[in-house]
Amino acid sequence: METVGVGIIGAGGIAAAHAKAYQMLGAKAQLIGVSDIDEERARAFARRFEVPLWSSENEEIFKRDDIQVVSLCLPHHLHAPIAIAALQAGKHVLVEKPLAISLEEADAMIRAAQKAKRNLGVVFQLRFESDVQRARLILERGLIGTPFYAEVSCLWWRRPMYYENSWRGKWATEGGGAVINQATHHIDLLIYLLGMPQRVYAEIDTIAHKIEVEDWCLATLYWDGMKASFCASTCAELEADSSRMLILGANGSIQMFPFRPHSRQEERHLQIAEACRTIPEQEIPGHTAEIHDFVFSVLEKREPRVPAAEGRRTLELVTAVYQSAFTKDVVQLPITPESPCYTTAGKLEMARRYTARKAERT
């Protein structure tokens, strides 16, 4: 195979970034079809990106033999059912984050991909940024010593109209708020650099928006010999959205957003600088780079750099945060099928009880 045919399901917002990334590949990828429940939006998207096929029916994408890759740019609750349908139709599937709204759904998606022998990837584009690769190399080489503390924050603001979109702000359709949507990238980066924690304690609240889900979260994550503070917000009224990650090691530190590694020990500082020079600058944005990697994973018959199993790990930590907030208790990882928030129904019931208890106090 020298080229892949591509279909995009969901023509809103982020779909344009997918279309542009595929078109950058020239002959390696051909945009063949787009579908959206809103027929006019599908038609307008097809006109804008010169896509020959448009439809309000996903089946029109699934039945095309000349489409091998499908991008899903959909509300969170639709990721699992439509990804599974696409996989069963023999397509390789790239899903926007999060992978799903529950681990039960994520596991069903992974099983479908395995059965179909097709690639299933999830978009976590920060992993492709040069500075993230530099931070990972510094940690792998032990250049700041053993990490003992981290801070991760996603202090963002979303206007009330953001939640006027019918699926946002609801547990059943968005799957949560600031944690699963905005800060899921920060959680993924934390896992990518430091691995999975062993336990979590979290609190959530809804401060500034009239929505079901949280617009604020504060959590503490625990590893052997290390702790991290994590906060996520869509209610932070700052001059500009703020993201922060700080990793303290016994012999140095790494700050992200922007990237600033440091050690007071001159020799280590020189080693850090040398390590950073071995990672070239990324020529294209991380989101585009990940889409390109997914295409080449299909062409080269290999696993994508961010397979569904990695997206599941991120969702597992997100799930632990919610379960801890619902139960007001420390949650041990891993999350098992017996955990109350593993299934979609279980998570929604826990959210319902949490909301009811909160209403009683107000």
Image (cartoon, rainbow, N blue to C red):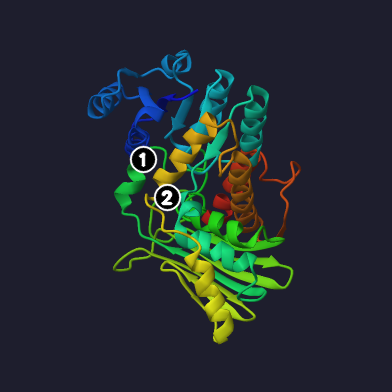
Q: Residue at x 55, y 40 (%)?
A: 99
Residue 304 visible in image: yes
Mark in front: 1 vs 2: 2
Q: In x, y percent, where is residue 246?
A: 52, 72
Residue 44 versus residue 218 in the image, above or below: above
Residue wearing tag 2: 286
Query: Taking 61 as reference, is 216 above or below it?
Result: below
Q: Mark 1 = which residue?
A: 14
The image position of residue 12, as x and y in percent, is: 33, 35
Up/down of 349 relative to 157, above or below: above
Q: Gap in Å between the C-alphas at discs 1 and 2? A: 14 Å
Q: Secondary structure at mark 2?
A: helix
**SS for tag 1?**
loop
Residue 168: x %, y % from top left: 41, 43
Q: Residue at x 42, y 38 (%)?
A: 167
In this rendering, would 108 be left or right of 53? right
- For label 2, the crowd category at 10 Å Cα-Cα, with few meaning under 14, some 14 to 19 and many 20 or more, is some
Name the foreground residue: 133 vs 108.
133
Residue at the spot 50% in from the left edge and 74% down from the top edge: 273
Q: Earlier in the sequence, mark 1 or mark 2?
A: 1
In-front residue for pair 356/336: 336
Image point (61%, 31%), residue name: 109
Quadrant hosting residue 281 = bottom left
**Residue 22, percent from left and from top:** 37, 34
Residue type at mark 1: give it. Ile
Residue 9 visible in the current orientation:
no
Locate residue 157 relative to residue 317 in the image: left or right.
Answer: left
